Image (cartoon, rainbow, N blue to C red):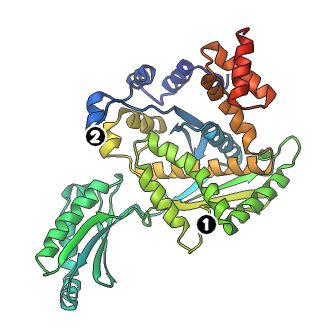
Amino acid sequence: MKIYEMTDEQRIKLLLDGGYIDQKQAELLRSRQTISTDLADSLSENQIGSFSLPYGFATDFLVDGQDYLVPMVIEEPSVVAAASNAAKRIKNSGGFKTYPTSRIVYGQIVLENVTVEEIAKLEQNDSEIFAFAQQAHPSLIKRGGGIVSLKFNHYDQFEEIELGIDTVDAMGANMVNTILEKTSQKLATMISGDVLCSILSNSGQGQIITVEANVEYNQLATKTMSGEEVAQRIVKLADFAKKSVKRAITHNKGIMNGIDAVLIATGNDFRAQEAAAHSFAFESGQYQPFTEWHLADGKLVGTLKMPIELGSVGGAIKAMPMAQLSLAMMKIQNSQQLQSVVGAVGLANNLSALRALVTTGIQAGHMGLQSKSLAIAAGAIGPEIEQVAKKLNQTKNYTLQNAENILMELRGK
């Protein structure tokens, strides 16, 4: 039986039997009570409940020679199916290869009303400032991280001290801000000017990853189009995204569908990721796609390059049981490994979207999965949902009115 044909209980048993989750995590999934009132109170203000989103997993991700099931949280139909579909095509062609770089978070201390002489003094004492900042968070040094760079930048009436900080496996927002604020207090004793603010940057410039995949032509063919023709059309559409900003935006949104879904499932800050990603896309002065596709040696070759800003420890990640379950399901050992998996999901979703667009069109698969949502919106319950959805897929008329009409016929009204 295929995974999408299984019941929820059968999927949970699959994960349990496969060693992806333990008995306690299985019970958490069965309960559908994934966050306690106390935890909700600690994570947000004025809370009166919790808001649920579908929690599923994508299959067939072969990343750097290791197989993964990838948890995804998203309400948009077809994203999980699209990720799994493309991942299988890529797995059959050898899998994803990833090339993470450093994991550096940058922080900014902004000064104003600082004289030229005081700026010179700070620059002359940069080693003292560096050493102070290094000791501002001792536990980070114990984990192998710490300050890796210190830079002075001048902006008219502002002076910036930029610190690069290796946060190891943490996303690092809190620890970086702690280091910055302690360091700014030190700076305040060295100048007569003011510290305007101390805050991390979500630029993501120190967390760039490259993901590559070669796809055999036979993995791309449709009933009416050869794999080589599909590949050629994918390359053309990807090239168009480099020229059309409007297309590039939608191209990248499809990539973020997959990336954000994994970040939410693992308790990461997807808003920070969005900010980092889209600023990177605009680095050249014209908004550009995160991926490139070309033909080489009889294959379609895809490359994703972008910042992926996340952590695998600390903060909400440690506090939220479902985030811990997600990391356990993927058998994640460190943040670099998670970064690689998330990048692979982004490239997979891009391949699925491009292949659909240049062949059957995006609505064919998307609306087929949307049919159950339409059935529920029309008032279908229990077995009626599958029956109405099946009829919607047969008629290809995906409207609420049609769903309501089918339901009325089904009920004999």
The residue singled out by tag 2 in the image is 45
Q: Could you tell me residue 272's position as x and y percent?
A: 42, 55
Quarter occupied by residue 112 = bottom left
Q: What residue is shown at x 32% (from left), y 55% (from top)?
A: 172
The residue singled out by tag 1 in the image is 288
In terms of secondary structure, where does tag 1 sit? loop
Amino acid type, mark 2? Glu
Point out the image quarter for the C terminus: top right
Point out the image quarter for the N terminus: top right
| Nearer the observer, 155 or 223 | 155
Residue 154 vs 225, above or below: the answer is below
| Nearer the observer, 75 or 399 | 399
Quarter occupied by residue 158 = bottom left
Q: Could you tell me residue 84's position as x and y percent?
A: 64, 39
In terms of secondary structure, where does tag 2 sit? loop
Apparent side of residue 397 relative to residue 163 in the rendered image (left or right)? right
Q: Earlier in the sequence, mark 1 or mark 2?
A: 2
Q: Could you tell me residue 79's position as x and y percent?
A: 61, 41
Quarter occupied by residue 304 = bottom right
The crowding category of the residue bearing disc 2, from other C-alpha atoms within 10 Å (few below 14, some 14 to 19, many at least 20), is few
Residue 31 vs 212, above or below: the answer is above
Q: What residue is shown at x 50% (from left), y 47% (from top)?
A: 260
Amino acid type, mark 1? Gln
Q: Is residue 403 visible?
A: yes
Apparent side of residue 230 relative to residue 6 in the rendered image (left or right)? right
Q: Alpha carbon of mark 1 to alpha carbon of mark 2: how far?
A: 37 Å
Q: Is residue 209 visible?
A: no
Q: Which mark is residue 98?
A: none
Residue 194 vs 45, above or below: the answer is below
